Amino acid sequence: MLLVLITLLSGSQWPDSIPVLSLQFEQSQWEYACDHYWEDIYVPALATCEGFTFQSQFRIRGGTSREYPKKSIKFEPAGIFIFGRDELNLNAEYLDWTRLRECLSYLYYSRTGQIVPEVHFVEVVFNGETQGAYLSVEDVDGDFLLNTSLPDQAVIYKCADRYTTLDRVYELEPYSKKTHEFQPWDDFLLLLYWLRLCPDDIFREQLQERFHFDDLISCVATNVLLGHGSTYYHNYHLLLDETGSTGQWRYVTWDMDRTWWKYGPEFPYHRNSCNNGNRRNTLIWRMWCDAAIREQLFAEIHRQYPVLLAFSEENTIDSLAALIAPLVEADPFRDYTMDQFWVEVENLKAWPEARYSYLLEQFEQWPLPFSIHRPEDSAGDIRITWQSAGDQCTWRLAISPDSLFTNPDDVIYEAFPSDTLHTVPEKFTGSDLWLQVFATRNGVEQRSDNGPVTPTAEIHHAISGSIVINEINYMSAPQFNPGDWFEVISVEDEPVSLAGWSVRDKNSTNLTTLGELLINPGQCMVFSSDSFAFTSTYETVPAPSLWLTFNLSDSGDRLTLTDPVGKTVDSVSYLPEDPWPWQAAGYGSTLTLLDTSLPNQNPVSWIAGPFGGTPFSPETWDPDWPAHGAASFSITGPVPVTGNLTLELTAIAPVTVKVRLYDITGRMVLAPAAAELEAGVSSLSLETSGLPSGVYFVGVKNMGFLQTAKITVLGTQ
């Protein structure tokens, strides 16, 4: 029976009619979950669907929708697939009187050729009482990748919580990963840094390289036509072709219930924040503020309009309305009449023409989206400049302690510049004050993105510069293993910000994004793959500047250092064999660049550095490590010793050793001996025949490490 159940319910095809999902459960458990709707409380249930009964569980899902009387639910069958899925996202569509908007939006998205989740209607029954229609929306996860033409190994970041606006690299809590959950987030961090730091003049070119650009243009245009007011600050996904890779990102929409007249046809085309200006989505806002990209978006909106109009004039809306009307009428949470339902259905069909008419007016009459440039010092004050918002605009500049500018009485400074620049007096600057510029055109006022009024003392550092890879430890010696690490040095005359820089090796998925680091002229920084091993081994140097998310290959690798806009600043490909110094391949030395003026891509520019390397130092010196050495010894020959004392010395790297012999009181009884050792095994003899019989100590010192052994000498005196 179970095999039959799995076979019938695991197919990817949904029935043409609306399937019924009936759940039997303890009512008190559901009531408790509803009283604690903000928690993910699972309710066990016996489910029946398509004539088969099986165990399951469900919980309340969603964000703000959890507060509504009709709850959206996540349904999870126990150990089986239902219609090809191991769980169902069942959206209540409570705010939508038609229950159709989200379904129509996904269907239209598909009509334009974009890849979006699959949707189907389901009737849900609780303990014998219908709850009306729900919309099943496919998760954007690993199964979604397998069911579509998208790369199976893509990494998916879900931007579902509020303020997933891609504007803060230090605020990742609202985001989540749906695939490669245990891999580093460096690819996402790199995107956030690029969005913040990429100069305006190359933004469009770089956007085309970093995103599936045509798809992104189509997605944004579709959202504009649909009046999607619940996206960009949350409710979307970002997919990268391969985790950590230099592949391209794509945008996949989500949660489309607030479309098709939900906010009215006059909804601003560039609206992408939840409070009309503060914390706008950096990606979308920069697209609208770029003149060339904006023209492409306008062109795509004009191209799509006939497609949307034709979609609304087909029988799709009427057919879906007729299919779902009985369930809307039976919905216990319906608080409107069926006449109102049919009026709303007609509004859905009228939407495209009404929306497009208002869009044409906005494009022609409203101020264009614009952004404020980085403030500049001006004799103690701050000089503010911003983009043009089109012809015949008037300007108003305001400063307030309220970042939302909700109360005009809070404004402490206001000016009406005649052009796109203004100097703000120093007394009105500070990180606790917010700047906003308003543009008015044809009686319509729009505002830019906003931000704190930068203090005049703040220093803006260069985002790129000459940083050289000058030491590499890719294969440690067994006796001295700090883990893999490499060192960079700045040969710039001014400090350089490494925020948004990245390090890669020859594996396309290996990536480390550098954080908020500032490197000064002549300064060295070390990046380590094992910070614990590094700090445990090097007890007298600072901790690594940053932790690498990958190891360096023992068989040879390529290290590439890249700035925030993707420019390769330095790159080194090394091998553990000639012409590269072999001593760095597990014998305790590091690859050390002779001089930063030399091309470090050339093996002859590198030497085998001292044992243990010289992290955080541009010099090649012998460090006095307190508990390690490059050589060890053992005693060979007859014991007790008569005549010559023979030592076998094993060196893992070229090193100088000093040998001394002491009596039991600690007095040195023979002149010290020194030997220059190559890597390998060698022997050293000391003449002891002139010593009296007794107990002695032999000491071998190298690299600051002293090793001793006790011997007995049978002398002739």
Image (spheres, grey):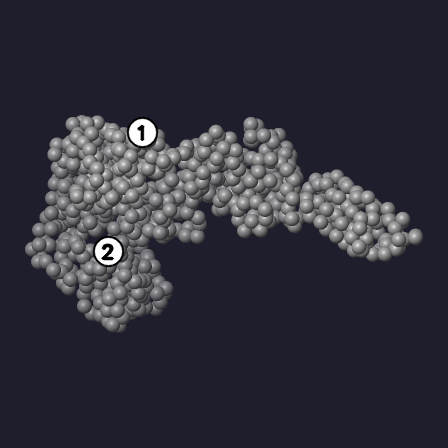
User: x, y (%) of residue 318?
Assistant: 13, 50
- Nearer the observer: mark 2 or 1; the answer is 1
Q: Is residue 167 left or right of residue 128?
A: right
The residue closer to the viewer here, 573 or 453, is: 453
- The amino acid marked with disc number 1 is Ser
Q: Residues within 10 Å of mark 2 (few under 14, many from 20)?
A: few
Q: Is residue 458 left or right of residue 358?
A: right
User: Residue visible at 23% across and 57% down?
Assistant: 65
Asked whether the residues under the numbered discs 2 and 1 touch, taking CB atoms below 8 Å apart as contact, a structural biologist would say: no
Residue farthest to the front, as pictured: 427
Residue of label 1: 378
496 in relation to 339, above or below? above
Q: Residues within 10 Å of mark 1 (few under 14, many from 20)?
A: some
User: Residue visible at 38% across and 35% down?
Assistant: 459
Numbered label attached to residue 258 = none
Q: Quadrant of the N terminus?
A: bottom left
User: Residue visible at 35% across and 32% down?
Assistant: 199
- Quadrant in which residue 438 is drawn: top left
User: Which structural element holds mark 1?
Assistant: strand
Q: Is residue 317 left or right of residue 296?
A: left
User: Which structural element holds mark 2?
Assistant: helix
User: x, y (%) of residue 194?
Assistant: 37, 38
Q: Is residue 428 visible?
A: yes
Q: CA distance from mark 2 to mark 1?
A: 46 Å
User: x, y (%) of residue 290?
Assistant: 28, 32
User: x, y (%) of residue 321?
Assistant: 14, 53
75 in relation to 613, above or below? below
Residue farthest to the left, as pictured: 339
- The amino acid marked with disc number 2 is Thr
Residue of label 2: 64
Q: Is residue 218 visible?
A: no
